[in-house]
Image (cartoon, grey):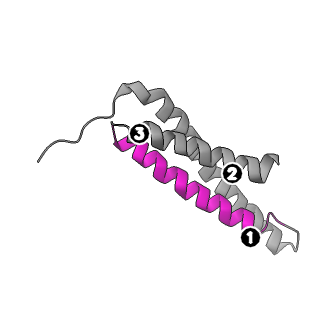
Amino acid sequence: MEAAKRPSRTYGFLRAVSGVLAVGMVLLALGNIGVQFYANSRDLPGPGTLSVVAHVVAALLVVGGQIVADRYADWKAPVASLAVFVVSAATLWTFWWA
């Protein structure tokens, strides 16, 4: 059995930044869920089902992309890191900045 290749250091910074974004997206999803539960318990308008579901889906996508970026050393690593950037930017733009 062949040992797994260690990811190259060429894309180390890109992987690190996409990892930070992935953690941030997970925290945003958890925060969104918490605010929705709080709002429902107090009969307040919360972020809404669409926002909560979109944040959870985005968090799952970026974590999956980050796993690919961390595990592969070929062209898949930077592509997965860029996918993390794109999904994070689209989610932030759609639900926070627009």
Identity of the residue drawn at 59% across and 61% down? 57
Identity, as a three-letter code, of the amino acid under mark 2: Thr
Q: Is residue 24 visible?
A: no
In front of the other: 56 or 87: 87
Tell me which label, 2 or 1, sits earlier in the chain: 1
| Local SS, label 3 | helix
Identity of the residue drawn at 60% across and 56% down? 58
Residue 5: image x %, image y %? Answer: 25, 37
Magenta-span inclusion, residue 53: yes
| Local SS, label 2 | helix
Residue 77: image x %, image y %? Answer: 41, 39
Query: Could you give the CA–CA distance between mark 2 and mark 1, rounded to whole angstroms?
Result: 15 Å
Marks 2 and 1: which is nearer the front? 2
Identity, as a three-letter code, of the amino acid under mark 1: Thr
Identity, as a three-letter code, of the amino acid under mark 3: Ala
Describe residue 41's horizontal placement relative to residue 78 as left or right. right
Residue 25: image x %, image y %? Answer: 62, 49
Q: Is residue 63 above or below residue 43?
A: above
Secondary structure mostly seen in magenta is helix
Q: Is residue 3 above or below residue 8?
A: below
Q: What mark, if any, has residue 77 been given in the picture? A: 3
- Span shown in magenta: 46-73
Identity of the residue drawn at 35% across and 43% down? 71
| Residue position marked by numbered label 2 in the rendering | 91
Marks 3 and 1: which is nearer the front? 3
Work out which residue is located at the far left of the displayed protein and give it. Answer: 1
| Residue position marked by numbered label 1 in the rendering | 49
